[in-house]
Image: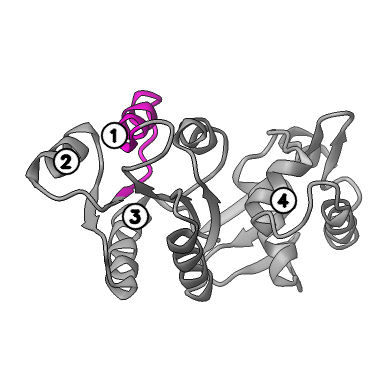
Amino acid sequence: MTRILVVEDETGIASFIERGLRTAGYTTTVIGHGSAAGSLARDELFDLMVLDLGLPDIDGVTVIEDVRRNGQNLPIIVLTAREGLRSTVASLDRGADDYMTKPFAFDELLARIRVRLKATSGHETTVLTVGRVSLDVRTRRASVDGVSIDLTAREYALAEVFLRSPDQVFSREQLLSQVWGYDFSPSSNVVDVYIRYLRKKFGQDFIETARGMGYRVSAAQLQTR
């Protein structure tokens, strides 16, 4: 599951990018303000950011600085209507990986995204294993004690979030963002429903409930069962 954060305040452009990326098989989260971008990129597990420079609250260059100051290495592709060399140089100097001016062809943006993701994929773990449970992110196959388990696309995506960050507590809102992309209301019980599905398939001890906080996979607990 490749997750892309789109920071774009123009609703039409943001919707255009989001639809195209989802059609291409990516999971997307879209926000329209730069002030939340740095913290969201820090707290969530994104693989790439598409960033508009002309945001209504803070400049996109400031967002880049914030992300890099926190030590995050996710690729950043800048989109902007600004012309001239100065903004290009400023963005790249602050840590952006690529730069496109508006209007742009979506196929070109998609190609640039693939290039950036490919450049970082050499560090990607092929098999995620916590205790008795394993996920092969290349073949998208799951297993318990070596026995294959059939998962739906949503079940797989949810399991991948947990196995990439064992022992981390995820709130319902975080899981909605990462797996469903806010397609559902925060008051929806869809997360709880899919937690039950995974427990049935992987074992009741696979996911712990952290009361008042959310859910987590405990690596130590799974190793001892």
Q: Amino acid at mark 4?
A: Leu
Residue at 21%, 39% in the rendered image: 91
The amino acid on which the numbered mark 3 sits, given as a three-letter code, is: Gly
Does 75 lie within the magenta span?
Answer: yes
Tell me the quarter of the picture where residue 111 sits. Answer: bottom left
Residue 86 x/y as whole percent: 10, 39
Q: CA distance from mark 1 to mark 2?
A: 9 Å
Residue 157 or residue 63, whichever sits in front: 63
Disc 3: which residue: 122
**Residue at mark 2:** 87
Which stretch did the figure color magenta? 59-77
Distance from Cα at disc 4 to Cα at disc 1: 28 Å
Residue at x 31%, y 28% (from the top left corner): 65
Q: Which mark is residue 176?
A: 4
C-alpha gap between disc 4 and disc 3: 28 Å
Q: Amino acid at mark 1?
A: Val
Element at badge 3? helix
User: Is the residue under label 4 in contact with that under label 2 (CB below 8 Å)?
Assistant: no
Question: Where residue 207 appears, x then y in whole percent?
Answer: 82, 45
Measured along the vertical axis of the image, is residue 93 above or below residue 27?
Answer: above
Quarter holding the C terminus? top right
**Residue at disc 4, secondary structure:** helix
For residue 117, the mark is: none
**Number of marks in the image?**
4
Tell me which numbered mark, 4 or 1, is placed earlier along the sequence: 1
Q: Is residue 162 magenta?
A: no
- Labelled pair 1, 2 in contact (Cβ < 8 Å): yes
What residue do we see at 33% from left, 33% from top?
Answer: 59
